[in-house]
Amino acid sequence: MEFVLESDSSKKTQEYGKEFSKLFKGGEILLLDGPLGGGKTTFVKGVMAGLGYSGRVLSPSFTISRLYKAEKYDVCHVDLYRLEAGDIFDTGIGADFYDKNVIYIIEWGQKLKEELSEYIEVKFEFLGEENRRLTFSMSDFCLKKFSRLIKKVLVSRHKTRSKK
């Protein structure tokens, strides 16, 4: 099942991230995919605000990962753009996947998707200079756990569509 939202600004993309953060219970892995400049880090800024983090959120493109201490969780923000799929686990990333005290947000997450049993994925597409389409999907396990919540938190508040 997929849920689709459209954004017409960076502010709206951040708002979606902030609302989406309400779903987290700890231990989630969020995979973000889309072109450079597609809105991935902008969405993460919203997620972090929703988790109570008030510091600066930067893209981890050059550092590979950044660890943020939010109110309830540690958030590991990872960017796999510069890594090959086989090199990911050599970095130590993922040693605490599914730890209830850590949320992983992974940009360019398609490189890791086949290795994971539980994940939520958001794909970003350009619709125009400022407009984006965000398509939410998830593993079967997460579908059972989150689909009702996603409908409640995101879909009910925004013009969207869901596809099976």
Image (cartoon, rainbow, N blue to C red):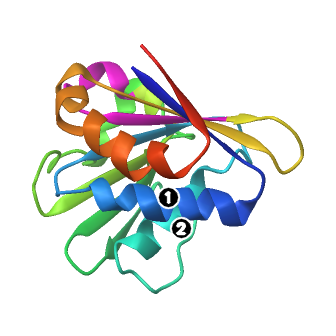
Q: Residues within 10 Å of mark 1 (few under 14, many from 20)?
A: many
Q: Which element is circle 1 on? A: helix
Taking depth in this image into account, of 142 and 34 the one nearest to the observer is: 142
Q: Quadrant of residue 30?
A: top left
**Which percent across, then down, holds residue 88?**
35, 36
Q: Quadrant of the N terminus?
A: top left
Disc 1 residue type?
Gly
Taking depth in this image into account, of 161 and 141 the one nearest to the observer is: 161
In the displayed orientation, state which residue is furthest to the bottom.
54
**Which numbered circle lies on residue 163?**
none
Placement of 2 over or under 156, stated as above or below: above
Magenta extent = 112-124
Placement of 55 over or under 125, stated as above or below: below
In the image, which is nearer the foreground, mark 2 or mark 1? 1
- Residue holding disc 1: 17
Question: Does the magenta run of residues contain 64?
Answer: no
Q: Which element is circle 2 on? A: helix
